[in-house]
Image (cartoon, helix red, strand yellow):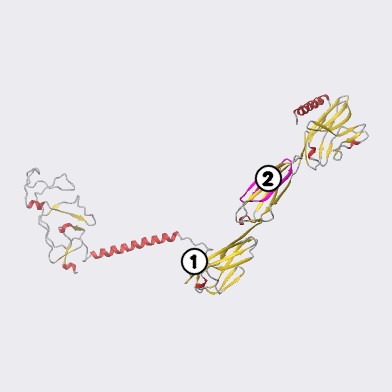
């Protein structure tokens, strides 16, 4: 709308306000809308003053691009007139307007079969005497509901081995005003494009195409186009029909074909669209065994299994798109190996079993150790009774069975300091002098310095901090009637043989 038109509309509004102050006004809706082909009413009512003024004529005008075009006229003397191109589609709503003496206070008009070209501003102008002209304006917006459709690019989509992308479906929202928004909903991995075209009549056509790489996985997938127009949501869906070569798998060999096993078979399963029409079997590097019977897609081996059945079996499956093959390597064993079933998962080992085995092993080891200890202990007991609670190092002690003479008594002049509790050190013999210069022992004094120790049974042979004593005679030799023991002691032969 041009700038001077804006100024004109503003002036019209100010003039209408002034008219209301003076007592006359034209009341209308500011905005009206409708869809193409529908019916819409444009209200216009004249509020007269007191005393009322005389209405000379009412004129409806279309205001578009700065130009006014008469639509309909109501005159008390000349009657009602609707001008082309509105003659067949516009009429006054109030029957009193069409009478010989019309009532012109309500001159609402009705648009039938609304067109896009009807979109404009419409002015309702009252000519009165002696007050002059009074008018108001309404803006009419015309919407166009789009025609939405979704189509497959081709009725049948063929998956080629070259793995090329192609447009599989197109969604169109045509001749809409305002334009629509198109989105896709599907589990297919693909991409889409979007294109808008503005038509001469003011509508917009929106087109979107979905692009995928046809394959066996895209067959029977659902593709949904969602069109949003204003507050409406329109959906359309298709199921893709993709043709592809056979996908072949041979079943029946379980890895346990052994000699003399009865009635084994191989089956050629093929997933294809369209369905497989021809199955062909062959054995690489040889011909099929004589006991084989072929029925459709299955090889039946009659009788027991022999080494002749071993080899690589190939199945060729053919449909109208192409031929694909599957193969299986069959080996024959002397005895069954009973492999775990492929359908049933193997049981996981119970951790409790491992724990029980470990505990049992520890208990068994402890029992064996105890028995070994008791056995060795009993072997050490070689006479009735038991050994003394003292073991004697260097053979200078005495045992229960020992017949050795006792050591001579310690001389009375061997003294110990009073301040020593654990370790007793000898003081000077025969005097109270110090250690230096007063000791002139020779020969026998060396024997007095030779210590011997006693240790409790079960203690380590650590001779520190032990009771110190002196021996005066050399170690006696073991008599002929004595027997030495493994613990260092001796017993008499009489006790040995008891």
Secondary structure beneath dot 2 equals strand
Crowdedness near tag 2: few (<14), some (14–19) or many (≥20) residues, C-alpha within 10 Å: many
- The structure residue drawn at horizontal position 15% and vertical position 51%, both measured from the top left corner, is 468
Question: What's the magenta region?
Answer: 166-195
Vertical relation: 227 (above or below) 139: below
- Please check the rendered image and state whether residue 453 is part of the magenta-colored stretch, yes or no: no
Q: Nearer the viewer, residue 123 or 30?
A: 123
Residue drawn at point x = 67 percent, y = 51 percent? 169
Q: List the residue tagged with mark 1.
A: 339
Q: Which of the marked residues, 2 or 1, is nearer the chain's N terminus?
A: 2
Reply yes or no: does residue 182 show up in magenta.
yes
Image coordinates for residue 209, horizontal then vertical, percent: 67, 48
Residue displayed at 9% across by 46% down: 428
Quote the CA–CA distance across marks 2 and 1: 56 Å
Quarter location, residue 387: bottom left
Which quarter shows the C terminus?
bottom left
Q: Is residue 343 left or right of residue 225?
A: left
- Majority secondary structure in the magenta region: strand
Asked whether the viewer can see residue 423, the reply is: yes
Q: Is residue 425 left or right of residue 232?
A: left
């Amino acid at each position: 709308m041009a700038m001077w038109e804006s100024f004109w509309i503003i002036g019209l509004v100010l003039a209408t306000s002034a008219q209301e102050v003076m007592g006359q006004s034209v009341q209308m809706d500011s905005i009206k809308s409708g869809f193409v082909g529908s019916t819409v009413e444009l209200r216009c009512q004249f509020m007269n003053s007191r005393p009322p003024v005389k209405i000379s004529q009412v004129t409806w005008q279309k205001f578009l691009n700065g130009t006014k075009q008469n639509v309909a006229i109501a005159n008390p003397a000349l009657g009602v007139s609707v001008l082309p191109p509105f003659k067949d589609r516009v009429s006054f709503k109030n029957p009193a307007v069409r009478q010989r003496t019309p009532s012109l206070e309500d001159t609402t008009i009705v648009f039938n079969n609304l067109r896009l070209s009807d979109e404009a501003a419409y002015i309702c102008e009252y000519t009165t005497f002696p007050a002059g002209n009074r008018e108001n304006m309404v803006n009419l917006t015309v919407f166009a509901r789009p025609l939405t459709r979704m189509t497959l690019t081709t009725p049948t989509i063929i998956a080629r081995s070259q793995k090329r992308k192609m447009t599989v479906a197109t969604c169109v929202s045509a001749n809409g005003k305002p334009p629509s928004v198109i989105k896709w909903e599907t589990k297919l991995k693909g991409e889409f494009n979007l294109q808008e075209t503005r038509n001469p009549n003011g509508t917009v056509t929106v087109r979107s195409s979905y692009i995928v790489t046809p394959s066996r996985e895209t067959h029977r997938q659902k593709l949904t186009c969602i069109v949003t127009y204003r507050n409406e949501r329109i959906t359309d869906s298709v199921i893709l029909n993709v043709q592809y070569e056979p996908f072949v798998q041979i079943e029946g060999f379980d890895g346990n074909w052994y000699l003399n096993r009865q009635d084994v078979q191989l089956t050629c399963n093929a997933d294809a669209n369209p369905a497989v029409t021809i199955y062909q079997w062959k054995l690489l590097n040889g011909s099929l065994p004589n006991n084989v019977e072929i029925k459709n897609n299955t090889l039946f081996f009659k009788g027991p299994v022999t080494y002749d059945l071993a080899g690589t079996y190939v199945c060729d499956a053919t449909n109208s798109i192409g031929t694909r093959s599957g193969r299986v390597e069959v080996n024959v064993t002397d005895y069954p190996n009973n492999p775990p079933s492929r359908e049933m998962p193997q049981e996981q080992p119970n951790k409790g079993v491992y724990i029980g085995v470990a505990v049992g092993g520890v208990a068994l080891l402890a029992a064996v150790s105890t028995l070994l200890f008791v056995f060795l202990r009993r072997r050490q007991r070689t006479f009735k009774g038991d050994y003394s609670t003292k073991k004697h190092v260097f053979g200078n002690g005495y045992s229960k069975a020992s017949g050795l003479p006792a050591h001579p008594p310690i001389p009375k002049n061997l003294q110990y300091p009073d301040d020593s509790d654990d370790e007793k050190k000898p003081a000077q013999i025969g005097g109270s002098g110090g250690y230096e210069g007063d000791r002139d022992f020779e020969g026998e004094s060396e024997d007095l310095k030779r210590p011997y120790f006693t240790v409790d049974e079960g203690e380590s042979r650590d001779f520190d901090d032990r009771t110190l004593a002196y021996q005066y005679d050399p170690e006696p030799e073991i008599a002929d009637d004595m027997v030495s023991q493994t613990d260092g002691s001796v017993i008499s032969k009489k006790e040995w043989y008891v």
